Image (cartoon, rainbow, N blue to C red):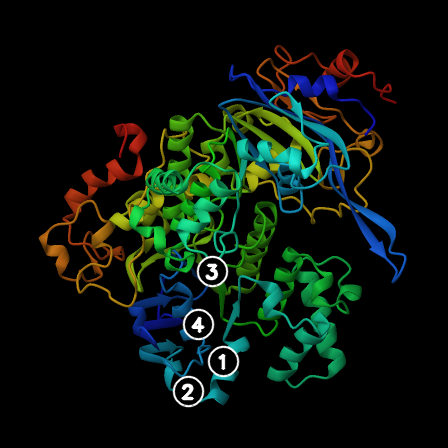
Amino acid sequence: MTGEPLLEVRDLKVSFRTEDGLVQAVDGVSLSLSEGETLGIVGESGSGKSVTMMSVMRLISDPNARFEGQVLYKGHDLMTLNPEQMREIRGTGIAMIFQDPMTSLNPVYRVGWQIAEQIRAHENVSKQAARARAIELLAAVGIPQAAERVDNYPHEFSGGMRQRVMIAMAVSCHPDILIADEPTTALDVTIQAQILTLLRKLRSDFGTAVVLITHDMGVVADMADRIAVMYAGRIVEQGSRREVFYDAQHPYTWGLLGSIARLDRPKPRRLATIPGQPPSLLRLSPGCAFGDRCAHRFDLCDERPPLLARIDGDHLDACHLEPKQKKELRETTIHPELIGNAE
Amino acid sequence: MTADSASAASAANGDGGGELLLRAEHVTKYFPIRSGVLLQREVARVHAVDDVSLELRAGETLGLVGESGCGKSTLARCLARLYPLTSGSVVFEGQDISRLSRRELRPVRRELQLVFQDPYASLNPRKRVGEILSDPLRIHKYGNRDEIKRRVRELLELVGLSPEHINRYPHEFSGGQRQRIGVARALALHPKLIIADEPVSALDVSIRAQVINLLDDLQDELHLTYIFIAHDLGVVRHVSDRIAVMYLGKIVEVSPAEELYQRPVHPYTEALLSAVPIPDPDLSDRRVQIVLEGDVPSPIVPPSGCRFHPRCRYATQICAQQEPPLAEYGSGGHMAACHHPLNIEPATAPAAEPLSAVAGAEVPAEEPQ
C-alpha cells in the first residue's frame, strides 16, 4: 500500500426516501483502494455493500436517493462529475460486474457486438478492429472457440460462461479498478473456482485493482488483500486479510466467522449463531447498530462507536470493548466447540 | 446402465441402526423434449435421474450434493412422488409408492413432507400464517377447529415463532422466519421423513446457522429422518450422517459424512471438495486447488461410459467406454463408481483391482476390456 490511493471513499452516506420513512442504506463509509490491491467487502444482504459501490459508479438514478460524502478517483471527486464525464470513467477507469450475468447482458444482441460496442464507445477504432479485440478478449477469459462464440447470443452460454463474457466486457478498456459485485454467488462451486482463478489471472496480468463484494468469507480469504466488514450500512471492521481472520476485533465479525459450517475444522456439535436478525434501516438506534444482537453489550454501546484503530496500524474496528477483553470474549464465539455448548 | 446395481444398492445403506424407512431402486426420471406443432413428437430426453438406488434408515440424515442440474432436486421429487417415475421403484415403510394413485398417495404424504429453497415462493402470499399451517391439518382431517388451532400454535412455538404471529402474512416476515414457517408446515402432520431441498441456500450466513440448528433440534425432539439437499458442502457435512454425491443424474459416491471429506474416492468428489473456498487465509494460500475445466455436459446426451470422464484428470480409455458400477470401499458403507478410485490403501481396500474384484463379486457385468 504505497503512495496515493487509487480510489478513496470519504464518509459516504446514501439514503433513500421511501413511503415508510428515510432508509439510511449507507451510513458514513470510508474506504481506500491502492493500485493493484484487492479489497473484499463482506456483509449480509442489506448491509449496504452493493449500494456503496453502485454509488461509487454513480449507477443509482433513483430520484429518492440522497448522497453525501466524496468519492475520489485519481484526485477527482466522482460525485461532482456530470454524466458525460462519468461515462468516460466507467469502463476505462472503473468497471463493474454483477451477480447475475443474464440480467446484465442484453439478450437480443450477440455478445461480440456488446463487447465491441463498449470498445467503440471509448476508443476510436473500426468495427473490424473492435470485433477482433472482442474475440481476443473472449479467448483471454477462457471461452473456447472464441472466434465462433463471438456471434452467439447470451442465452447460448452457460452461467459461468456468461460471467466470463461479462468479465471480458469489463476489462475490454483496461480499467484501473474492477468492481465485482457477488460475481460467483449464482454459480456452482466448481465454476466459482474457475471464475476466481480467472480474476486472479487478470489481476496479475493487468495489475487491475479489484473490489470484491461477497457474503462468502471463504471467497475473501482466498482473494482479498484487505477486508472491510459491513453491517447495517456501516463498516464495523477493516483490516488486512490475516488481521480480520486471525485477530477479528468486532463481535459481528466473530459471529460471521463462527456461523460458517467449515470444511477445514472438526465439525462442531452446533453452529454458533448470531441471535435475532439485522435491524431495520428505517429506525437505526443512535448507538451501535449491532448492539441488539451482541452478547457483550454494555452501557457505552448506546453511543455509536467510531471506526478506529484500537490496536495498531491499519486494523480498524467499531466496538467499544477493550482490545484485551475482546481477545478473551472472541474465543467463546468463534470456537464454541472448544468451550462446550455455546448456547 | 450396463450393470445391475440392485445388490450394490442394498449395500448403499446406513449403519445408523435404525430400521429401513425408504428404499429407492433403479429410480429413473427422463423428461421428454417435444417438438412439432400438432404431433409433439418426442425428439430427445433429458436424463435427469438415471438409475439411482439408495436406502434410508429411520433417524438418519442423508445429504445429497451436486452441482445445479445434477438431478438432486428431481430425485427428491421422485422419492416424494411429486413426479411420476419413468422407471424404478420407491418403497416407503414397506409399501411401494411408485405406482400409487393420487388418492392412494394421500396417507403417504402425511408421513413424507418437503421443505423448499425459496421461502418467498413456497408460501402463499395471500394467506395468513394461521391458514398456511392449518391447511394440511384440515385436508388430512386432523381434528376439530379447536384442535387444529391448538396444533398451529404448538407448531409456531416448535419452530421458534411467537403464537401471536398467527394472523400475519408471509411478507411481514424475514427470510429466516419464513423458512421457519415452511418447516412448521412440513411438521404439521407429524411426518417421519422430511425432504429439505436447499432449505438454507437463500438465507444469510448468520440466519442460516439458526435454521440449521433448528432442524437439528427438531430431529432430536421428533425423531425425524431427513434428506437434506444442498450445494454447500460445509452445510451438508454439518447436518448429514451420510452423503450421496450426484453428477449428471447418477450417484457417483455414497459415504458416511466424515469419511467423504477425509477420504473421497471419486475424483468428482475430490474436485468438488477442493473447489470450496476455505475461510482461513493461510490454509487457503497453501492448498493447491483442483479446478475442473469446462461445464457440466448436457444431460440430454450424457457422455458415454463414466459421465465424469470428459472433465476428469485421471480418465483413461476405459472411462469413456464402460460405465463404472457403484463398488464398495471399506466396510463402512462407502461406495463409489469409478475406474480409478482415489485414497485407497492397498491393505484395507479390495486389493489392487478394486473394480474387477468388487464388480465380479457383486454385479454380473461384462469383463473389462
Badges 1 and 2, same chain: yes
Numbered mark located on residue A89 in the image: 1
- Give the mark nearer the N terminus: 4 vs 2: 4
Q: Please give the chain letter of the residue carrying mark 2.
A: A
Check disc 4 and report the residue beneath it.
A54
- Give the mark nearer the N terminus: 1 vs 2: 2
Numbered mark located on residue B249 in the image: none
User: Picture coordinates of residue B167 (x, y %)?
Assistant: 35, 55
C-alpha gap between disc 4 and disc 2: 15 Å
Please indicate whether residue B178 sits to the left or right of residue A321 in the image. right
3 or 1: mark nearer the eye: 3
Please indicate whether residue A86 sits to the left or right of residue B337 in the image. left
Q: Residue at x 69, y 66 (%)?
A: A154
Can you tell which quarter of the image residue B307 is in? top right
C-alpha gap between disc 2 and disc 3: 46 Å
Q: What residue type is labelled 1?
A: Ile
Q: Residue at x 77, y 37 (%)?
A: B86
User: Picture coordinates of residue A335 (x, y %)?
Assistant: 31, 34
Q: Do the residues labelled 2 and 3 touch (CB within 8 Å)?
A: no
C-alpha gap between disc 4 and disc 1: 14 Å
Element type where label 3 sits in the image: loop
Q: What residue type is labelled 4?
A: Met
Q: Are marks 4 and 2 in contact (CB under 8 Å)?
A: no
Badges 2 and 3, same chain: no
C-alpha gap between disc 3 and disc 1: 46 Å
